[in-house]
Image (spheres, rainbow, N blue to C red):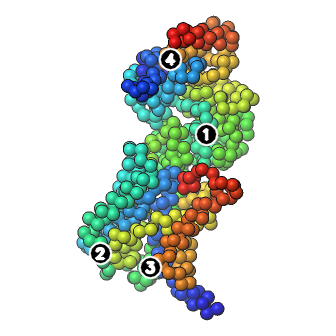
């Protein structure tokens, strides 16, 4: 379960280019719920994700994961509970290390690292099995350095790494945006399969309206650092892409009027 | 013909002495490799940590401490120096190279304070080489055996460590710090510990060097960094750096080959003052080679030292 309570963040406070990124944002995501976040550029999507993962510290407000306040914890401590897939395939993996070593790093995300050997035969067998689910042949390239993989393969690997330890919360940061349409579909299908199988509480940011319509239990639209609109239940099940874009249009008109 | 013969003869006669020296300096090369390759943290601390280890060891030997105690304290001092460099970089976001320069400059004063004067003779004090059986103390053989065994032990231990769960995490910090952090790795702890370990190895080298040569000098670190870098480049060219095993073997192999090359140059009559220029040009060539190979056009605007 994820709960964001009146999150407030202002960049460059008191300067000419002061920018309110999060303006008293409230959001609650139940256990096993799959929320899809949309919003135009600068709406606060990335700031919200960064605030949850810990790479952005809030001016005020709280972040709760499964009821525990994690607001004061650094990124590496929050990693015990949450996993994240970045937009940039380069960011989520260690390029100069092998596929198996990357899997090991993710595997130990929520555990204490010991001085025992890292890549044991048992672990390698487990990783091979997990990667074979993707159907990309990565299971036969465990000793390949990740820098030699394609963007799609790297992103698929990031996904498998993220869902590996069944994290309390999965953050997907436009994780298919940098991929070609076909690969994006493969990665998205793998995401949905994993999220449904493991019943992961998931927060996905996307610019792809079709994805927002097709996937998830709830659509959350952000605007100017707060939740503008939430669509869930039957309404979410029946919504179409034009409807969603309509909401964007309304917002844009309002912005025009306001300015 | 005569020239070749005399050169060769003096080179051969120098091999054992050079080998002993290169094994000792292998630890500095290791202290340069660990931050540079494992942590992507180009570090200059070794230029100050090497004489620091020497000065600490010298003072303790002169005070009558056992050679092992002297080495142990030098190790701790070097570790602290490395930790400071890493902390300066992390806390104040100062570039790693600048943090290293600050540290080695400050260490010069610290080293002088420790010794109280610019050099200190500890000739005749007991050394770790006295304990090697079947050899005459003071001769290269005892040094080669003692330092050779130590190198082997360090090599095996590091090779095991960097393949453990924790060692893999440290390497991840060098490969991609953002990703490492997102995987629950404490980047600060890994960086400070890793650079500290490297400082400890540089100081170890200085301490053993002082026991080997019988005196400590605040200027003994001058140019050690560029020599070490040259040795590392040679080692990587010979054994490669594709695996943990090769990457850790490279400093030791490189040190041995590099100092034999230097010895050959000196035997051939090269004036010692020209050595630094030659070494510098060599390192430059090794660093420039990849970019020259990549394109014949203008060099890409990337820092070769960071690769």
Residue A218 visible from this viewpoint: no
Query: Is residue B210 in view?
Result: yes
Q: Residues within 10 Å of mark 3 (few under 14, many from 20)?
A: many
What residue is pinned by disc 3? B142
- Considering only vertical position in the picture, is B293 above or below A66? below
Give the label, 2 or 3, closer to the camera: 2
Question: Label 1, label 3: how many angstroms apart (C-alpha)?
Answer: 50 Å
In-image side of B20 versus B304 (left or right): left
Depth check: B43 or B290 in front? B290
List x then y, in percent, for residue B23.
49, 72
Q: Sequence order check: which comes first, mark 2 or mark 3?
A: 2
Return the chain for callout 4. A
Q: Which percent across, then down, holds residue A71?
A: 41, 26
Above-or-below relation of A239 to A154: above
Residue at mark 2: B120
- Disc assigned to residue A90: 1
Residue found 66% across the figure and 18% down from its top: A209
Q: Nearer the viewer, mark 1 or mark 3?
A: 1
Q: Residue B119: give x, y in percent of width and height.
A: 30, 74
Q: Give the Cα distance between marks 2 and 4.
A: 69 Å
N-terminal label among 4 and 1: 1
Tell me, yes or no, whether dots 1 and 3 are on the same chain: no
Q: Secondary structure at mark 2?
A: strand
Q: Is there a contact, CB below 8 Å, between mark 4 and mark 3?
A: no
* Count of marks overlaid on the render: 4
Q: Position of residue A243 (x, y in %)?
A: 66, 9
């Amino acid at each position: 379960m994820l709960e964001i309570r009146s999150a407030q963040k202002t960049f460059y406070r008191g300067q000419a280019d002061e920018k309110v990124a999060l303006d008293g944002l409230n959001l609650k995501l139940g256990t096993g719920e799959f929320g899809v976040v949309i919003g135009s550029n600068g709406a606060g999507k990335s700031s919200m994700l960064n605030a949850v993962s810990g790479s952005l510290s809030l001016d005020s407000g709280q972040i709760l994961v499964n009821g525990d306040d994690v607001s004061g914890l650094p990124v590496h401590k929050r990693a015990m509970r949450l996993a994240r897939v970045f937009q940039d395939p380069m960011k989520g993996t260690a390029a100069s290390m092998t596929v198996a070593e990357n899997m090991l790093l993710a595997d130990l995300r929520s555990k204490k690292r010991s001085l025992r050997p890292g890549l044991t035969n048992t672990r390698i067998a487990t990783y091979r099995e997990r990667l074979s689910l993707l159907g990309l042949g990565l299971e036969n390239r465990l000793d390949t350095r990740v820098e030699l993989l394609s963007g799609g393969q790297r992103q698929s690997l990031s996904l498998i790494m993220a869902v590996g330890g069944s994290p309390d919360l999965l953050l997907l940061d436009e994780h298919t945006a940098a991929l070609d349409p076909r690969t994006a579909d493969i990665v998205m299908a793998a995401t949905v399969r994993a999220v449904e199988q493991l019943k992961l509480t998931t927060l996905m940011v996307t610019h792809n309206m079709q994805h927002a319509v097709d996937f998830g239990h709830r659509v959350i639209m952000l605007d100017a650092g707060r939740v503008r609109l939430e669509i869930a239940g039957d309404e979410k099940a029946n919504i179409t892409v034009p409807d969603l874009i309509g909401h964007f249009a309304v917002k844009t008109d309002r912005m025009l009027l306001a300015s | 013909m005569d020239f070749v013969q005399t050169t060769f003869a003096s080179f051969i006669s120098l091999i054992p002495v050079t080998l002993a020296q290169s094994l000792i300096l292998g630890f500095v090369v290791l202290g340069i490799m660990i931050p540079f390759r494992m942590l992507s943290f180009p570090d200059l601390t070794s230029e100050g940590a090497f004489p620091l280890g020497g000065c600490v060891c010298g003072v303790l030997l002169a005070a009558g401490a056992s050679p092992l105690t002297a080495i142990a304290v030098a190790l701790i001092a070097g570790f602290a120096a490395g930790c400071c460099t890493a902390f300066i970089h992390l806390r104040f976001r100062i570039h790693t190279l600048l943090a290293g320069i600050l540290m080695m400059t400050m260490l010069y004063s610290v080293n002088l304070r420790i010794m109280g004067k610019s050099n200190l003779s500890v000739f005749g004090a007991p050394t770790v080489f006295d304990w090697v059986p079947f050899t005459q103390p003071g001769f290269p053989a005892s040094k080669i055996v003692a330092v050779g065994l130590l190198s082997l032990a360090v090599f095996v231990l590091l090779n095991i460590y960097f393949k453990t769960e924790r060692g893999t995490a440290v390497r991840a910090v060098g490969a991609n710090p953002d990703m490492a952090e997102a995987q629950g790795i404490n980047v600060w702890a890994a960086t400070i510990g890793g650079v500290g370990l490297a400082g400890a190895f540089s100081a170890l080298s200085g301490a053993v060097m002082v026991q080997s040569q019988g005196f400590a000098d605040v200027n003994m670190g001058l140019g050690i960094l560029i020599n070490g870098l040259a040795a590392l480049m040679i080692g990587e060219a010979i054994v490669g750096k594709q695996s943990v095993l090769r990457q850790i073997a490279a400093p030791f192999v490189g040190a041995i080959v590099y100092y034999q090359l230097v010895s050959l140059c000196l035997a051939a009559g090269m004036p010692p003052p020209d050595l630094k220029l030659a070494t510098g040009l060599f390192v430059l060539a090794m660093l420039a080679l990849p970019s020259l190979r990549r394109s014949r056009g203008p060099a890409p605007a990337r820092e070769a030292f960071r690769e």
